Amino acid sequence: MTTTDSNLVGFPLRRPGQPYPPAEYEGLRKREGLVRSTLPTGAPVWLVTRHEEVRAVLTDPRISSNPSHPGFPRPAKTGGVPAQDQVPGWFVALDPPEHTRFRKTLIPEFTVRRIREMRPVIQAIVDERIDAMLAGGNSADLISDFALPVPSLVISRLLGVPKADCDFFEAQTRVLVTLTSTDGQREAATKALLRYLNRLIALKTKRPGDDLMSRLLADGKLTPQELSGVGMLLLIAGHETTANNIGLGAVTLLMNPQWIGDDRAVEELLRYYSVADLVAFRVAVEDVEIGGQLIKAGEGIVPLVAAANHDETVFECPHQFDPSRSARHHVAFGYGVHQCLGQNLVRVEMELAYRSLFERIPTLELAVPVEELPLKYDGVLFGLHALPVRW
Amino acid sequence: MVRISVDIDSCIGAGQCVLSAPEVFDQDDDGIVMVLDGEPAEPVAEDVRLAGRICPSQAITVHED
Ligand code: HEM
Ligand code: SF4
C-alpha cells in the first residue's frame, strides 16, 4: 500500500468535547493496512487500530519496547509523568531476554492467588477511605478522596512502606499525576520518591518484613538499584491507571445502575474505557509486515488499544456498555510479554471499590451534570480530573 | 475432548488462564502456569479454549481431538 499525504492522520486523535474513544478510530479500522500518522514532534509513526493487528504488533519479536532504538516514537510532553526509561529496573522499556529476568522475578508477587490473599488489606484501605469521606460531610471529590488514594495506598502496602510513611508516599505520587503540577514539582517529587525507595530498601535489608521489597532483596536476583527502579515503575504504572478506571467506572455505574453489584462490570469497564490507549509504544528493529503493511526497521508504531477494544468485528456493538458480554479478550492491559503485571490487582481493587462504594453509600449521586465532568483529554491516560459527588 | 499443552518457558505469569479456567490451570510458586487437568471435559473445555485464545504469551495450545 502506498501512503499519500491526504492519508496522514494527526496524533493523538483524542480531543476535548469529542466522544471517547475518538470516533475517527472507526474509519481508521476500515482502512487497508496501517495508518500513517505524525506525532506532535513531527516524527512519522504507524497507527494500529484493529484487534488482530494490535495483538500481532505486541507479540512480534522484531518489534521492540526499548526507547534507545532509533526511531522510537516520542510523544510530545503532555503533562504526564517524567520519562523514566533510563532508570535501571524500568523493565517495561526492555525486550527479552533482559525483560524476562525482571518479569520472572516479579510474577510470584502478582499471581492470582497472591492477590487474592491481599483482598482483606485492599478492603481495609477502601473502607478507610469511605470512612474518611463520610466523616467529611455529604459531598466529596471521588477522584482525589477515593480513586487516587486507594491504589497508591495499596501499592505502598504491597511494597512494604510503613504505615506512617503512606501519607508522604501518597502526596508525592499525587504530584506526579496532577496536571497542574509544574515540571519542577514533578521532578522534585520523582527525586523524593527515588530517595525514599532507596531508604526503604536500606530499611528492609536490615529489618525484612512480609512484603515484596523484602522478599526480592532476600532472593538477590535484582540489585538494590534495580529494585528501586522496579518500585518506581510499580508505583507509576499502577496509580493513575487504576484511579482513572475507578473514577470512570463509578460514573458509568451511576448512569447505568442496573449493573451495580454485578462484578462482570469490571472487565467491561476495562475494555470500554481502555484508559492506556497511548501507552504501548513500539519501534520495528527489523523490517516486518503487519496487516499487509511493510514496516521498515527504525519506524515507530503505536498500537491503539482503545481502537482494538472497540473493533466491531471482535466486540458486537462495541460502543455499548454491556457487562453481560464476554470481554476477556480485550487488550486494555496490552498483550504479549509486557501484558500488565498488575492486572489481577486492578481487578480486585475495582471490584472491592465499586462494591463498597455503592453498598456503603447507597444514595451516592453526581453533584454536577454528567456533561460537565472534567475529562482528561490532555494526559497520556484517559480519565477524569475530578468527580464531584454527594449523598 | 480437548488436550492441553503449555510452554512454561514462554509463560509470563499473567494469570489469565487461572481466571478463565481455575479447575484446569494454576500458577506455581514462581507464578508459572501449571495444568491441573490435561484432558478436561466439556463444559470446562470452553473455558480452556478461551484461556488458549487470550494467553498473552501464547503459551497454551488446545488440541481438539
Ligand atoms: C486499570 C489499571 C491499569 C491499566 C489499564 C494498565 C495497563 C497496562 C498496559 C497497557 C501495559 C502494557 C504496556 C506495554 O506493553 O508497553 C501495562 C504494563 C505494566 N503494568 Fe499496568 N495497568 C494498570 C494497572 C497496573 C497496576 C495496579 C500495576 C502494579 C501495581 C501495574 C504494573 C504494570 C507493570 C509493572 C507493567 C510492565 C510489565 C512488563 O513490562 O512486563 N499496572 N499496564
Ligand atoms: S495466561 Fe499464559 S502467560 Fe498467563 S499464566 Fe497462563 S499460561 Fe502463563
Image: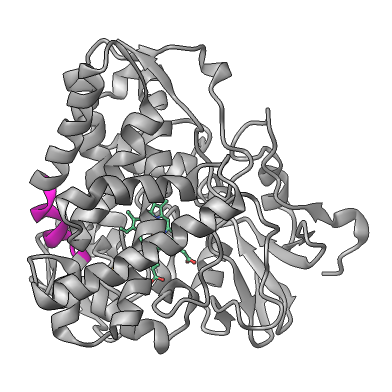
Q: Residue furthest right?
A: A5
Q: Residue at x 15, y 78 (%)?
A: A205
**Horizontal and vertical percent for residue A269?**
39, 38
Q: Please identify the quarter of the rendering in which residue A47 is found.
A: bottom right
**Horizontal and vertical percent for residue B40?**
12, 66
Q: Quarter of the image containing the N terminus of chain A? A: bottom right
Asked whether residue A351 is drawn in magenta, I would say no
Q: Is residue A266 above or below residue B36?
A: above
**Horizontal and vertical percent for residue A255?**
41, 18
Q: Nearer the viewer, residue A371 or B35?
A: A371
Q: Is residue B11 above or below residue A128?
A: below
Residue A277 visible in the current orientation: no
Q: Main secondary structure of the magenta part?
A: helix
Q: Is residue A103 above or below residue A260?
A: below
Q: Please identify the quarter of the rendering in which residue A366 is found.
A: top left
Q: Report ligand 1 position as a quadrant.
A: bottom left
Q: Nearer the viewer, residue A346 or A184?
A: A184
Q: Residue at x 35, y 80 (%)?
A: A226
The number of discs equals: 0
A386 left or right, relative to A44: left
Q: Please identify the quarter of the rendering in which residue A124 is found.
A: top left
A214 left or right, relative to A284: left
Q: Quarter of the image containing the C terminus of chain A? A: top left
Q: Residue at x 50, y 33 (%)?
A: A384
**Horizontal and vertical percent for residue A164?**
17, 49
Residue B23 visible in the current orientation: yes
Q: Nearer the viewer, residue A165 or B44?
A: A165
The magenta region covers: A110-119
Q: Residue at x 52, y 54 (%)?
A: A186
